[in-house]
């Protein structure tokens, strides 16, 4: 009875997860990963699949993903670097994408930048799209079409983010501006504003954030985007006076102004007989303001 249940479970596993039937190492690895919830055991089977040439493209990529989940990202990076030559030409882009995630996980920013620049070069040379205007991508099991413009802007956005992690906001600004020229969206707009704030270019940053707030960019209506804009505006306000105070003469708070204000306060605080008239004048002025 238990054997029959096991056989039926494996048949359903093949159909539901679209894994080829059989008892090869790759199928055993996926069964251990998905059905048995045994990631360590699945890695052993993935290694066997790679060594025996059983669906190496998928085995290497899937094993790296499992290793990342187990905080074995460094090992996953070395595995891809050492064995990607066994994989087909069609699998190389997917492996690059996995590598980028692994580099990010390990904080290897320079490696991210180098790989992203390589991907941009491949797009420019027509290697990623094979001369076509679009390509088929997959996310969460669903297929969709991606244009060259969208992919280029996405890679540029990731490159800008990597430069931000290094604190090179000038380089990140240049990259984000280029990405926005190709395919603009609210996320890259917010990141660009962040770069400008870090360079004390507050007016430019505020202008971009206001455009995001009024829905000028794709994705502006997303709740997370709205929250991000609010956070950046609060940061701006903490660094820059509100607009209605910026052009008031004498608001530069130089030393003479501060010293003069301090002297005036000290004068008011002295217990002199003429104190009352001074405060009467201030009170009259206050009443005029109230009107």
Image (cartoon, rainbow, N blue to C red):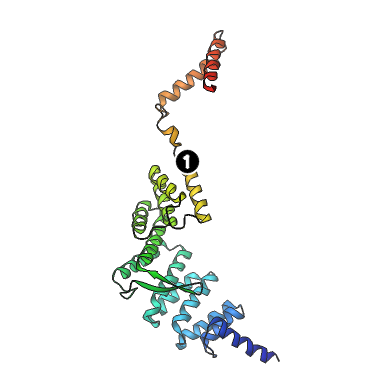
Q: Position of residue 290 (x, y in %)?
A: 54, 22
The residue indicated by pointer 1 is 237
Q: Is residue 53 above or below residue 163?
A: below
Q: Position of residue 114 (x, y in %)?
A: 35, 65
Q: Give the quarter of the figure containing the N terminus.
A: bottom right
Q: Is residue 73 above or below residue 206?
A: below
Q: How many marks?
A: 1
Q: Residue at x 49, y 85 (%)?
A: 49
Q: Nearer the viewer, residue 132 or 31?
A: 132
Q: Residue at x 36, y 59 (%)?
A: 179
Q: Residue at x 42, y 24 (%)?
A: 257
**Image quadrant in which you'd find residue 21:** bottom right
Question: Within 10 Å of the Cα at label 1, are there few (<14), some (14-19), or many (20+) other Cα atoms?
Answer: some
Looking at the image, the residue that sits furthest to the right is 1
Q: Residue at x 55, y 13 (%)?
A: 280
Looking at the image, the residue that sits furthest to the left is 125
Q: Position of residue 289 (x, y in %)?
A: 52, 22
Looking at the image, the residue that sits furthest to the top is 273
Q: Nearer the viewer, residue 239 or 42?
A: 239
Q: Nearer the viewer, residue 154 or 60?
A: 154
Q: Position of residue 270 (x, y in %)?
A: 55, 14
**Image quadrant in which you'd find residue 12:** bottom right
Q: Is residue 193 above or below residue 10?
A: above
Q: Nearer the viewer, residue 30 or 270?
A: 30
SS label for mark 1? helix
């Amino acid at each position: 009875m238990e054997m029959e249940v096991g056989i039926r479970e494996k048949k359903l596993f093949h159909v539901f997860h679209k894994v080829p039937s059989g008892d090869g190492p790759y199928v055993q690895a996926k069964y251990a990963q998905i059905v048995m919830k045994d990631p360590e055991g699945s890695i052993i089977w993935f290694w066997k699949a790679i060594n025996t040439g059983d669906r190496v493209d998928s085995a290497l990529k899937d094993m790296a993903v499992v290793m990342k989940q187990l905080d074995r990202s460094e090992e996953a990076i070395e595995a891809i670097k050492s064995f990607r030559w066994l994989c087909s030409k069609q699998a190389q882009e997917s492996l690059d994408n996995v590598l980028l995630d692994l580099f990010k996980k390990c904080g290897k920013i320079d490696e991210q930048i180098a790989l992203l620049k390589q991907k941009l070069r491949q797009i420019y040379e027509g290697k990623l799209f094979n001369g076509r205007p679009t390509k088929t991508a997959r996310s969460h099991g669903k297929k969709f079409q991606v244009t060259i413009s969208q992919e280029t802007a996405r890679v540029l956005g990731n490159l800008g983010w990597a430069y931000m992690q290094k604190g090179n906001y000038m380089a990140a600004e240049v990259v984000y501006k280029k990405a926005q020229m190709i395919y603009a969206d609210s996320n890259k707009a917010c990141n660009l504003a962040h770069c400008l704030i870090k360079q004390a270019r507050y007016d430019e940053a505020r202008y971009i954030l206001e455009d995001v707030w009024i829905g000028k960019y794709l994705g502006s209506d997303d709740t997370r985007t709205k929250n991000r804009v609010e956070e950046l505006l609060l940061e701006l306000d903490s660094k820059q006076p509100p607009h209605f105070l910026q052009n008031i003469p004498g608001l530069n708070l130089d030393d003479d102004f501060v010293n003069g204000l301090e002297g005036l306060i000290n004068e008011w605080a002295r217990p002199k007989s003429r104190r009352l008239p001074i405060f009467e004048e201030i009170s009259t002025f206050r009443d005029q303001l109230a009107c």
